[in-house]
Image: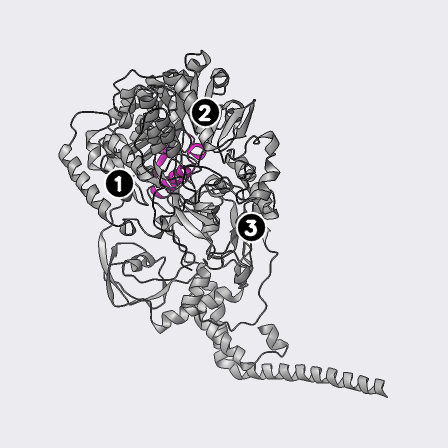
Amino acid sequence: MPRPQPKTITLTIDGREVQAPENAMLVDAAKHGDVEIPVFCYEPKLGNPVGACRMCLVEIEGIGKLQTGCSTPVKDGMVVHTQTERVKEAQRSVVEFLLINHPLDCPVCDKGGECPLQDITFGWGGGISRFIEPKRHFVKPLELSPLIAIDRERCILCYRCVRFSQEVSEDYQLVLLERGAHSFVSTFDGHPYVAPFSGNIIELCPVGALTSRSYRFRARPWDIEDAGTVCTLCPAQCNVTLTVRDERVLRVLSRDHAEVDDGWLCDRGRFAYPALSDGLDASATAEGAVAVEAEVAVAATAGVGVDTGGGTALATGGGNGGGGSLLADPSRGPRFGARVSEPLLRDGGELRPVPWERALQEASVALSRAGARTGAIAGGGATNEEGFLLARMMREGLGSGQLDSRASGWLALAQQRALAAPALQARISDLEFAHAVLVLDCDPIADAPILDLRLRKGMRRHGMKLERIGGEDLLALRETAERLAGEGEELVILWGERFAAGPGGAERAQALLDIAASLSLAEIDGAGLLEVPASANGRGLREAGVLPDAGPGLSDLDTDAGRDADGIAAALAAGELSAVYLLQADPLSPEDPFSRGDSSWGEALERASTVIAHAAFLTEGIHEHANVVFPAETYAEKEGTVTHPDGRLQRVRQAVAHGGSRRAEWRVIAELSSRLGCDLGVEGGKSASQQLFDAVPFYAGLTLEEIGGRGVRWQERPQARAGVGGASGQDSASEDEVRTEAASGERTPPDAQAHSGPDTDTHAADTETEDADGDSPPSDPPRTGTDK
Amino acid sequence: MLERIDAGEATPMDLDIMASVQDHIIGNCLCVLGDAMAMPIGSMIAKFRGEFEEHIEAARTRANLALGATAAGSEALIAAEAV
């Protein structure tokens, strides 16, 4: 299905000539002319408009009745009036109608201050109501689900939530019961609304009828600050806005990006936030209990493990004293599963908090003793920079090439390069517009949930054909792919990393490449392969050089190839390697992609004389086996870049200050490396990113400003023409050109950087005190609050 | 609103509100059932306004009488107690 290429037409709105794409809805077209038409029920993400709320009535010349702007496609030469007395009167009466039964309890409503009904009433309403009759009453608030509270009195019956449930997530659970003035939103038979994407209806609701139970009464919009970043809980890397109050993440909202998440979030990403920042005394308050309960519900429905302790870890005395002591007994060392907020050292069989100096010293002594007999694996939400610096420390500081980020094990470098070839990469939006999609050994709802909604959208709205297949039968795979290619030339194969795992992985990867070649997916725009890596930043870590047989950008190594993850485990168990560095990976934790489900890693960590880990939480393997644990940042505390499975580099921005005595991980790795006698020359987060961009050929010339708030897909940059890992045909002229551009870009003042609007507010307030080693934290403009 | 008319709590201003509400419903609503109800109400108010006003007035008088009766009754009661 080729993407629609609408032609531009001209219409007149309020006397202005407005250029807009043909068949755009009038409400959207008006925005091109800076005319705002108020809406409640209209939301293009939900599909076809319904015209239920009547707020968008406008006058169109030649049509007698007022028309709804949200469901009227624009035509060339249309003349529209939005400011006539007739329109204004209709808008006033619609607001009056909507408020007949609205309780106007704004002072106690969570939505107050960020409520479209409030805004529109102020902007377009009459200011008074002539109705003195009693309003309708419902029991309030009801629990729609463990996560969501519903207040049916506040509901204006706009149908948004029902449409989401019916037409986007397709769980068909929400319905409008009764008719006319008696209608209300409910689920069938009052069952709780439990679905993987249920949280989106909170954000969709234009009034305070649907509120998050865990955010309820936590903050008002004027108490909070917004921080745009990228969720790195899964490879989908949805763009999010974190709601921050007093250095705590209180809410996760979607930051609409049509090429990444389409404006939706899964419940895991939306509700697992108590784990993101310190200081939420989850067990100390009743509201906290709701948050934890909600979290458990999410974990149960989404099948993921989150820390049920609610994010509070050690009793460090910082900010959250009282709550912390409930969860950890200082005399017995940190509790299993707790958040790590300061360096830990195993002493007498127990992990105990130690100062940074001691932890770094112990780690560097142990690493230099092991030297080249050190292995490393990186996973989780480790950023490109962290992976890159880890690889440099391993290769340059320790002379060891034993490092891996592919949880599925070794794959020949040539195959990896072929699979990562720029022309072969499908975009996320291709999943929606392709003629057919083959889901190969991948379970979108578990691996990258938001892709599930994208596939549903493709099928529902664009008639995309979808098939799922496991990876065992290569003959069946080929047949299915060829059959689907018959649906149309644009075929996207969405494949999971595990397809190419284990013995026979190379053969299967080759089969996939052969299919792609025979169907010439690389030549067709809109067709291609899209891999869902096992770890959230799997693609970025590989491209940063965290591979046993490749350097940055999948380049050739001068040295011999090292072992892959399984090889490292085997070598540790056999005593060939003596130390292992776990960067946000715990192969003993069942949720971790490196987990093998057998005893191989258990034996490996048992035999290893040194286990050094960066961990946000004390999971099984870390708690049992780590000698030194450095506290890892969550994505809300991190600054760096990650690479989306389709090659989009995105920035992870720091939203809250480091809790406890946590430090930036790139800094810990750089410090450790310099203690090993290898100064990485990293002066700040920016210089780490710069080193990465200089080292990876197809990232060359990138700047953090260029990546900005929307990300940059490297396949679309001129540097990608050189291909992946290939030393041939480097287009040096274009590279120089881009470098010059980048250099001039750097001279612009930080405030004038090309961020795309308020959603990317620079929001790094690192309140961490200066360390003895004198690293200066990146200087950032002051954060900005919400303008309310 | 109709209950208020019947209870004698309405004023002729309520008729104006009804007339304007039906005017705003006609042509502006998604569902034509709205128009179907608004049209007869509109013509009723337009054609028989006098009768509605009479009805409102009659209800008010009724209510006032009832109120007056109660008030008179309680006054009598108080007087009786005083004696």
Chain bearing tag 2 is A
**Residue B31 shows up from this direction:** no
Q: Which mark is residue A362?
A: 2
Query: x, y percentage for residue B70?
Result: 74, 82
Chain under disc 1: A
How far across and how far down the image is residue A94, in percent? 44, 66
Mark 1 residue element: loop
Q: Are marks 3 and 1 in contact (CB under 8 Å)?
A: no
The residue closer to the viewer here, A262 or A473, is A262
Pointer 3 and pointer 1 on the same chain: yes
Amino acid bearing label 2: Glu
The numbered disc on residue A703 is: 1
Disc 2 secondary structure class: helix
Q: Residue A135: x and y, percent?
A: 57, 65
Give, as a three-letter code, the residue at label 1. Thr
Instruction: Decide whether residue A446 is among the magenta residues.
Output: yes
Placement of the N terminus of chain A among the 4 image quadrants = top left
Q: Viewer-nearest of labels 3 and 1?
A: 1
Residue at the far left in the pictured view: A733
Gap between marks 3 and 2, in whole Å?
A: 50 Å
Read off the residue under disc 3. Answer: A149
Residue at the spot 46% in from the left edge and 22% down from the top edge: A611
Q: How is the image coloured?
A: one colour
Q: Looking at the image, is A404 positioned above or below residue A130?
A: above
Rendered location of residue A178, percent (x, y): 56, 55
Q: Residue furthest right?
A: B83
N-term-proximal mark, 3 vs 2: 3
Boundaries of the magenta span: A443-466
Q: Amino acid at mark 3?
A: Ala
User: Nearer the viewer's eye, disc 3 or disc 2?
Assistant: 2
